[in-house]
Image (cartoon, rainbow, N blue to C red):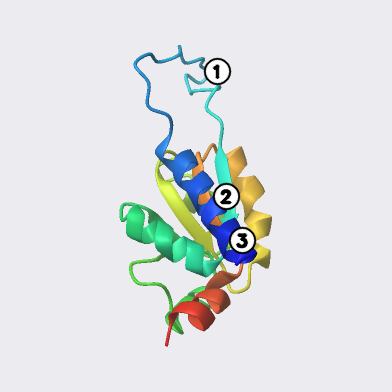
């Protein structure tokens, strides 16, 4: 029972973080030399497959990024997932093409590559990244019957 309550608390916090605060005033936005928002703080959240599936239902506009190899992706993937291979030399340049303000649910096979990639996402200025830390293995174990 305590574990279930803890998961609900975590899910509530994630939902609040992803929806942002609603207010009547907006703070001024600082920009760096490139004109990019330098005050925007990235929101990176770790969660398991069951919690991630709930977020996808609540935020259908979220984009699933599968960072496994094309061969692994072809063997099975989350519907509508975009495949960008973490091991490819073009990984960073492919990420650079994506919208930094979109919410991404990102995963690999077991969570190791995706955890290692978080630094790249942050360096590139992504603002909303949900890391499915049990990977596609967790998704298949918990959600695919």
> Which circle, 1 or 2, is nearer the viewer?
2
| Residue named by callout 2 | 45
Q: Residue furthest bottom?
A: 145
The residue identified by callout 3 is 114
Disc 2 element: strand
Q: Which residue is mark 1?
A: 32
Q: Earlier in the sequence, mark 1 or mark 3?
A: 1
Please provide percent x and percent y for residue 97. 42, 46
- In depth, the one of 71 and 29 nearer the eye is 29
User: In this view of the protein, can residue 83 be seen by the observer?
Assistant: no
Other-residue count near label 1 (Cα within 10 Å), few / some / many at <14 / 14–19 / ≥20: few
User: Circles 2 and 3: CB distance less than 8 Å?
Assistant: no
Is the Cβ of the residue at disc 1 closer than 8 Å to that at disc 3? no
Q: Which mark is residue 21?
A: none
Q: Residues within 10 Å of mark 2 (few under 14, many from 20)?
A: some
Q: Is residue 135 above or below residue 123?
A: below
At which x and y percent is residue 35?
47, 19
Indicate left or right for 37 with 88 as reference.
Answer: left
| Residue 74 placement, left or right of 119 | left
Label 3: how many Cα within 10 Å (few below 14, some 14–19, many 20+): many
Secondary structure state at the residue bearing disc 3: helix
């Amino acid at each position: 029972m305590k574990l279930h309550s803890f998961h609900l608390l975590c899910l509530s916090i994630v939902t609040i973080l992803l929806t942002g605060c609603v207010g009547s005033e907006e703070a001024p936005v600082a920009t760096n030399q490139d004109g990019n928002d330098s005050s925007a703080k990235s929101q990176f959240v770790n969660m398991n497959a069951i919690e991630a599936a709930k977020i996808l239902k609540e935020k259908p506009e979220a984009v699933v990024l599968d960072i496994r190899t094309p061969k692994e992706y072809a063997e099975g993937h989350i519907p509508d997932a975009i495949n960008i291979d973490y091991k490819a030399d073009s990984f960073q340049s492919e990420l650079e093409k994506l919208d930094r303000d979109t919410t991404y649910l990102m995963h690999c096979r077991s969570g190791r590559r995706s955890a290692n990639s978080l630094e790249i996402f942050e360096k590139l200025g992504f603002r909303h990244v949900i890391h499915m830390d049990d990977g596609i293995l967790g998704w298949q174990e918990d959600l695919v019957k």
